[in-house]
Amino acid sequence: MISDKMQTFVSGSSAVRAMFEEGKKMAAEYGAENVYDFSLGNPSVEAPKSVKNAVIKVLEETSPNILHGYPNNLGFEDVRLALALQCNKLHGTDYNENNIVMTTGAAAALNIILKSIINPGDEVVVFAPYFGEYRAYAGNYDGKIVEISPNKETFQPNLEEFEKKLTEKTKAVIINTPNNPTGVIYSAETLTKIGGILKAKEEEIGHPIYIISDEPYRELFYGDFNIPFVPDFYDHTFIAYSYSKSLSLPGERIGYVTIHDKIDGFEDMVSALSCANRISGFVNAPTLWQKVIPHCLNESVDVSVYKKNLDAVIDILTELGYEFVRPDGAFYVFPKALIDDDVAFCQAAKEFRLLIVPGSSFGCPGYFRMAYCVPYETIINSKESFKALKEKFSR
Ligand code: PLP
C-alpha cells in the first residue's frame, strides 16, 4: 500500500506527462503525422555536434577510475571551477568552485535547494502561471506553495499582490525567466522591484527570504534581450540551471546550482546542498556529463529553429483570432482558451488531434499551453485543427 503523501502526489500527477502518454497512443492510432502534439517541452532541435565530440573526447581521455567513480557529492572540482570562471567572465562575479553544485538537471537543483532551506509549513511563493512541478517539489519538504495571481495583460509578476502575500513564514520565492508556460522575460526593472520588496520584508521579519531563480531557458530568447543575472539584484539568490533545453539534453540529467557568495550562511548552505544531493538519492550528477560540460561552455542549440516555429505559431493563432501575450523566450505560448473551462477545452481539442495542456496545471485556469518545440511541419499542418477548434466554440 502506498503512503498517504505519495497518494496525494500520484492523484495530482502531471497533466503534461499524462497528455504526452495520450499523444503516443493517438500517434499509434492515427499516424504520428496526423497528431499535433504540443504537450511536452521535449526539445526538437538536436544537441550541437560539439556535444557528441566532447563525449568521445572525455571517454577517450579520462581515466575510467575517475570518470566512472564517485566524485565529491558537489561534483568534480575542476568542472565546478570551470563553471565558476565562466560565470565570472559573463557576470563579473568572483566565484570559485564552492559557488557551484552539479545536479541531475534543474529538477534536482530545485529539490536540493528546497530540501536545504524549507522547514515544514514554510511558504514558497510562486507567480502564476508557473511550472506545476513546483507544487510537488515544495510538498516533498512539507513546504506550502503560495500563488500570486496572474497579471493577464502581460504575464509579468503582480508585485502589489506579491508584497501583500509575504509573511513571517515566507522562506523562498521561485522565479522563472524566460518563463514556462508564458515565454515572458522579466526585465532588470522588475527584478529591482522584487529585490527591494524582499529586502524590506527580510528586515521586518528578521530572517532571509531566498530567491530561487529557475533558469533552464536562459539561452532561449528571440530578440535583442539581455537576460538579467538575478544575484545582481538580490544577495540571497540561488540559480537552478540545466542543460536540458540549452543543449537539448533533457534525458542526460545535467545541471547545476549557483549559490551567490553573499547568500546568508554560505558555508553551511554548501554543506547542506552537498548532503541533500547525497541523501535525496541523486548522490551526484552523472559523471560523464559533468566532464563534458567544460568543453561546451560556449555552445547552445540553434535557437533560430525555435524562432521560426514561434513566428509560424504567432501567424496561425493571430489569423484565427486566438488571444495571447507574445512570448519572448523559452518555447511555449500560453493563449486564452475559448471557454472558461480550460480542461474541457483541451479535452475538446483532442477531437481535432490537437494535444495542448490546460492552464490550470500552471495555476492559471482559462488558458492553455502549447509547446512549439516540435517539427515545423507539425505547426503548419496543425492550422486546420486550430481552425476547427475555433469554429466549434464560435457557434
Ligand atoms: N523548471 C522549468 C520551468 C521547466 O520547464 C523544467 C522542465 O521542463 C524544469 C525546471 C526541469 O528541468 P530539468 O529537465 O533540467 O530537470
Image (tube, helix red, strand yellow):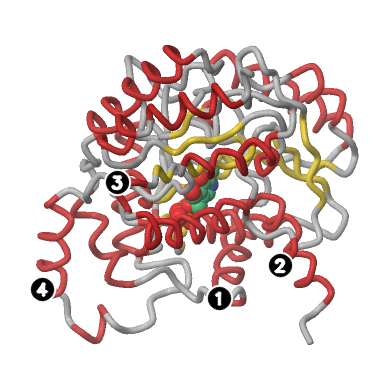
Q: Secondary structure at mark 2?
A: helix
Gap between marks 1 and 3 measured at Cα: 32 Å
107 vs 82, left or right, is right
Circle nearer the N terminus (4, 2): 2
What residue lies at 33% left-to-right and 49% top-to-bottom? 83
Residue labelled with disc 3 = 44
Q: Secondary structure at mark 3?
A: loop
Q: What residue type is disc 2 on?
A: Val
Q: Earlier along the polypeptide chain: callout 2 or callout 1?
A: 2
**Residue wearing tag 2:** 10
The amino acid sitting under disc 4 is: Glu
| For marks 3 and 4 on the same chain, the one whose residue lies earlier in the sequence | 3
User: Could you tell me the amino acid type at mark 1?
Assistant: Arg
Q: Quadrant of residue 325?
A: top right
Give the alpha-carbon distance from disc 2 to disc 3, as whole Å.
Answer: 28 Å
Q: Return the disc, 2 or 3, that comes first in the chain's sequence.
A: 2
Q: Is residue 65 above or below residue 129?
A: below
Amino acid type indicated by mark 3: Ser
Q: Which residue is mark 4?
A: 61
- Marks 1/3 in contact by CB < 8 Å: the verdict is no
Q: Give the image location of residue 97, x and y in percent.
A: 40, 56
Q: Earlier in the sequence, mark 1 or mark 4?
A: 4
Residue at left offset 49%, top offset 44%: 355
Name which residue lies at 53% across and 17% down.
322
Residue 278 shows which numbered tag?
Answer: 1
Q: Is residue 236 visible?
A: no
